[in-house]
Image (cartoon, rainbow, N blue to C red):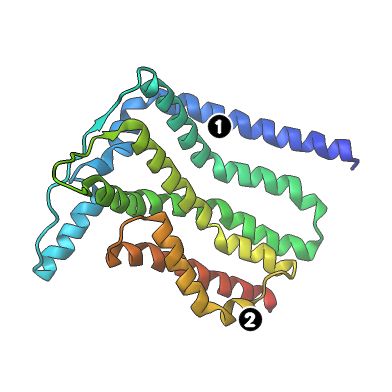
Amino acid sequence: MTFWEHLDELRKVLFRSAIVIVALMAGIFMAKDFVFDTVVFAPIDSDFILYRLIDKVLALMGAPLLPEFNLSLINIDLSAQFFIHISTTFYFALVLSVPFIVYQLWNFISPALYENEKRAAKVAFAFAGILFLIGVAVGYFLIFPLTLRFLGTYQVSYEVANQISLQSYISMFTWLILIMGVVFEMPSLAVILSKIGILTKSFLKKYRKHAFVVMLVVAAFITPSGDPFTLMAVGLPLYGLYELSILVCRDIDK
């Protein structure tokens, strides 16, 4: 294929992906009440599944339960709610369309690969979409609620009441969830880098201890909460992804 034919194929991939995103946006936009009341704003209340699970664990340990939590959001911009509705709809559509986009990218890239390269790349692309959605789920059910609960109740003084804006909430909601989806792509990236010779199993094993410290630093960056529980709740899954990357490289080395 010529350069222009490759560009034409890429244009088709982007066009099909855009069509899927727009179609999903239309459906999500019309499901506003479910998207916001049931999904987006669920972590602001004590009835959220993570908080109830923590309470059950604390009850079994005989420890005091979590205090009641109910965060109120305010809007101070006339047009903010409308544009937040649109932007949130786009992010939801983008997340849901990732497996399709990955599939389209694979169809675009695979013809240019040798057979031995296809085997490794096929595994990476097959799991890329799944790992992204798992990362998003971890961000939604674990990382964001813990961060929200800490920051939403933190006060430098009782004289200063927290008034959380809708824009601030949505910004952190989308950022934390999307970044966890990206972080969970680590094993897929390890497959590709290992295949082209940049990353090796021995290198990952050699710096395993360093990686653990780095993962804790990344966890501290993702979640501003300073308590050890939150830090380990985020850091351990990240380190687990590192160990999974070692296993993936081992399979490829064989």
Find the residue positioned furthest to the top: 78
Left or right placement of residue 85 versus residue 190 in this view: left
Q: Alpha-carbon neighbours of circle 1 within 10 Å: few (<14), some, or many (≥20)?
A: many
Give the amino acid at mark 2: Ser
Left or right placement of residue 171 versus residue 230 in this view: right
SS state under label 1: helix
Instruction: Using the image, tell me which numbered label, if any, was put on residue 113.
Output: none
Quadrant of the image for the C terminus? bottom right
Residue 111: x %, y % from top left: 80, 50
Residue that carries the numbered disc 2 in the rendered image: 202
Residue that carries the numbered disc 1 in the rendered image: 21
SS state under label 2: helix
Left or right placement of residue 229 versus residue 125 in this view: left
Which residue lies at the image location 63% right of the left edge and 55% below the top edge? 125
Quadrant of the image for the N terminus? top right
Which residue lies at the image location 49% right of the left edge and 31% below the top edge? 90
